[in-house]
């Protein structure tokens, strides 16, 4: 299974729900070489909102998939 590292947990769960075992190959990692302080993640800014968008969408996706019975 090749998909974004952010989506991998949900994608594996979907396949396993159908009884299909997969070998995961996560791609599209998001990382930054610049060290940031803890305040970067909690002080409101446009950049912080953009960086939180993917994990929040993935969590919402997990909840929706669970409610729809995909997981």
Image (cartoon, helix red, strand yellow):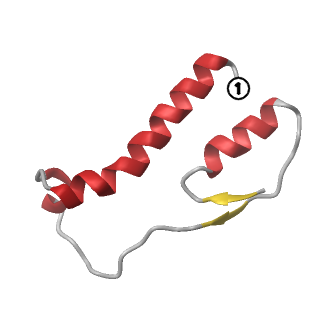
Q: Quadrant of the N terminus?
A: bottom right
Residue 13 location, quadrant:
top right
**In the image shown, does 7 or 39 lie closer to the viewer?**
7
Please report the residue visible at 73 percent of the width from the left and 36 percent of the height from the top. 14
Residue at figure coordinates x 87%, y 45% from the top left:
21
Q: Is residue 49 above or below residue 47?
A: above
- Image-quadrant location for residue 32: bottom left
Q: Which residue is nearer to you in this view: 35 or 3?
A: 3
Q: Quadrant of the C terminus?
A: top right
Q: Residues within 10 Å of mark 1 (few under 14, many from 20)?
A: some
Q: Name the residue under label 1.
A: 70
Residue pictured at 61% horizontal, 23% vertical: 66
Residue 9 is situated, as x and y percent measured from the top left of the image, at 63, 46
Q: Where does residue 33 sit, x and y in percent of width and height?
A: 35, 82
**Quick one: which residue is furthest to the bottom in this view?**
33
Please give left or right for residue 53 compared with residue 43 in the image.
right
Above or below for 15 versus 48: above
**Of residues 9 and 49, the one drawn nearer to the viewer in this rendering:** 49
């Amino acid at each position: 299974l090749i998909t974004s590292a952010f989506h991998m947990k949900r994608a594996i769960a979907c396949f396993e729900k159908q009884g299909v075992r997969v070998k995961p190959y996560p791609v599209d990692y998001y990382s930054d070489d610049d060290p940031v302080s803890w305040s970067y993640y909690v002080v409101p800014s446009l950049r912080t909102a953009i960086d939180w968008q993917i994990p929040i969408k993935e969590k919402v996706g997990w909840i929706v998939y669970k409610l729809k019975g995909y997981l």
